[in-house]
Amino acid sequence: MKKGSYVKFKFRENEYTGLIISGGKVFTVRFIFEGSLVELKGMPQQFTETDAPKMDTSSAMDAYTVSGYKEAGGDETIRFECTLLKNGKKIARVSNDGYGGCNEYCSFTSSYDDIKQFHADAKQWAKDHDITLYETADTWFDWYTIVRAEFITADAYLDDFKSAFAK
């Protein structure tokens, strides 16, 4: 096992899958726990190598991408701004001031229709994963810009939300 390998392990009586981000005598592994991306340190013998997570099923959200994502600190949440695109076309400037509120979506046109469709597609994305979320578009956005970069699928991310809400 080495940096970049996926591993299974037990944590608080449950089995999780994570990504080794630092190897050596002590591994650092990133994984989703109760809806948050966290890091855990442990001895190599505590982990078992496993296959990478399966790819997500396709959805209307596949048409959306993000460009120009820039973080700048934040107090309760990450402060950021970027551009949301659908099929390569700019539809909104997305930002968060980092003080714990929801994301702001500002249309590049005088019509709000593209942003309404984005929110509708995000709700369907959550429904397809059998979960109801508050601020579903923001949840997709967090997964797309932060968690997906750690090779964690939307399926795995939302499954963890389901297990956290079931408690």
Image (cartoon, rainbow, N blue to C red):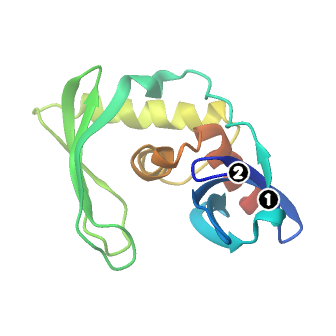
Above or below residue 27? Residue 117 is above
**Nearer the observer, 145 or 116:** 145
User: Looking at the image, is mark 2 or mark 1 earlier in the sequence?
Assistant: 2
Local packing at callout 2 (Cα closer than 10 Å; few below 14, some 14-19, many 20+) is: some
Q: Which mark is residue 1?
A: 2
What residue do we see at 62% from left, 48% from top?
157
Residue at 61% x, 62% y: name it. 23
Q: Is mark 2 on a helix, strand or loop?
A: loop
Q: In which quarter of the image is residue 73?
A: bottom left
- Judged left or right of residue 92, residue 138 is right
Q: What residue type is labelled 2?
A: Met
Q: Are marks 2 and 1 in contact (CB under 8 Å)?
A: yes
Is residue 167 visible to us here? no
Quadrant where the C terminus sits is bottom right
Of 85 and 32, the residue lying toward us: 32
Residue 90 percent location from the top left of the image: 18, 30
Q: Can residue 41 be seen in this view?
A: yes
Amino acid type, residue under disc 1 in the picture: Phe
Q: Position of residue 49 (x, y in %)?
A: 77, 47
Residue designated by label 1:
47
Q: Is mark 1 on a helix, strand or loop?
A: loop
Q: Residue 5 location, x and y as percent?
A: 64, 47
Q: How far apart are marks 2 and 1 (CA)?
A: 9 Å
